[in-house]
Image (tube, rainbow, N blue to C red):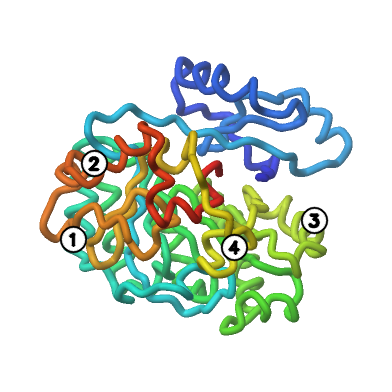
Amino acid sequence: MEYINLNSLTKKYQTPEKIRQELLLRYAPITASDQLIVTDAMELLRGEYLVQEALKNGIRFLPCRRVSHIKETKNFPKRILLELTSECNSFCTMCPRNSLVRPKKHLESNLAKKVIQECAEHGISGLWLYYIGESLLHPDFFEILEYCRKYDSLGPIWLSTNGELLDEKIREKVLDQPVDILNYSVNAMSEENYKKVTPLLNFNRVQQNLKELVRRKSKLKKTKPVIRAQMIEIPYVLNEIEEFKKEFGSKVDMISVIKLELFSQGSGNTGNETPNKYINKCNRLEREDFFIFSDGSVTCCDTDYNCTFNLGNINKQTIKEIYEGEKYQSLIAEYRGGRLHQHQLCSRCHDFDL
């Protein structure tokens, strides 16, 4: 569930009216009546009355459904998650990186730029400059981000961080050269529970870095990045979620409380080892996302963090060649034919409907 700071709603609509209406037609029927509908750019599509009533009653944030316009692409992924590094300064207990067997390394900068250029030429609906790893550890992160800004056909550009590295110097760079959406992992609201989730990082520093980022952004009157603070529904922090909402709901632009996905807990600890006998619909494949890892290997599902599908490698192929290649097309044909559960990875997956 996401919540939006009502002060972060913009009155400057960039999304064309036709697309806004299409988004409403698609999402209004499946969105609860007490939820706002907003775009990635913080544009309000539905819920003006809810906003007015909330403000009258001193309520500063409301639940929302954030919706994205997904452009049609021809023989090309719709969105790209580009892992700039699989290195990390943390060891979060719920992270699938703990089960990583592929190399831990930075993506070569020239290779990252090659990917970005190809994505821009085809036009995509979103570029995530992370997957597993802390992207701010990449020595050329801001150079790569600057390269992204040469193009206007990449969709929203995302960064996710654990916040440890966001000292004053990095905060200034993040605000001077912003991504569109910055996801900030808060993880817990007490030092005791934070250490259970993220034992290597400093709770007070991570909390203070977020507050200083928000303060500085407000002082500079910046609209970007959209700051999205996040907690995950880990059993021992559930009693801190309300405190998280109260503390940050009216400070950052958005807050997010997300489900703990079973795949991130490793194949031996999902809590449900009954194999799938049939997968009618896999939302992850339906999205047509590609995940490009720091060694150049490519997959099409975020549960495949060790790249067992191994659709190809951008060191040797273009993204389009991989999309049109036999491995990916065969996988999609198996999915359409109801045979996806025959893959070991898919037979054990219980997150295909997320």
Provide the residue designation for mark 4: 270
Alpha-carbon distance for marks 4 and 2? 38 Å
Alpha-carbon distance for marks 3 and 2? 39 Å
| Residue 142, numbered label | none
Residue 123 location in percent, x, y? 27, 35
User: Which element is circle 1 on?
Assistant: helix
Q: Compare marks 4 and 3 and give the one earlier in the sequence.
A: 3
Q: Please determine whether, in this image, residue 94 is positioned above or below residue 66.
A: below
Q: In which quarter of the image is residue 326?
A: top left
Observer-side mark, 4 or 3, equals 4
Can residue 146 be seen in this snapshot?
Answer: no
Other-residue count near label 1 (Cα within 10 Å), few / some / many at <14 / 14–19 / ≥20: some
Q: Quadrant of residue 315?
A: bottom left
Provide the residue designation for mark 3: 246
Which amino acid type is marked by label 2? Ala
Observer-side mark, 1 or 4, equals 4
Q: Is residue 233 or residue 49 the one in the foreground?
A: 233
| Residue 111, numbered label | 1
Residue 272 vs residue 89: left or right? right
User: Which element is circle 4 on?
Assistant: loop
Q: Marks 4 and 2: CB-CB under 8 Å?
A: no
Q: In which quarter of the image is residue 125?
A: top left
Which amino acid type is marked by label 3? Lys
Which amino acid type is marked by label 1? Leu
Q: Compare marks 1 and 4 and give the one earlier in the sequence.
A: 1
Other-residue count near label 3 (Cα within 10 Å), few / some / many at <14 / 14–19 / ≥20: few
User: Which element is circle 2 on?
Assistant: helix
Please state, as top left, top right, bottom left or bottom right, where the C terminus lies in the image: top right
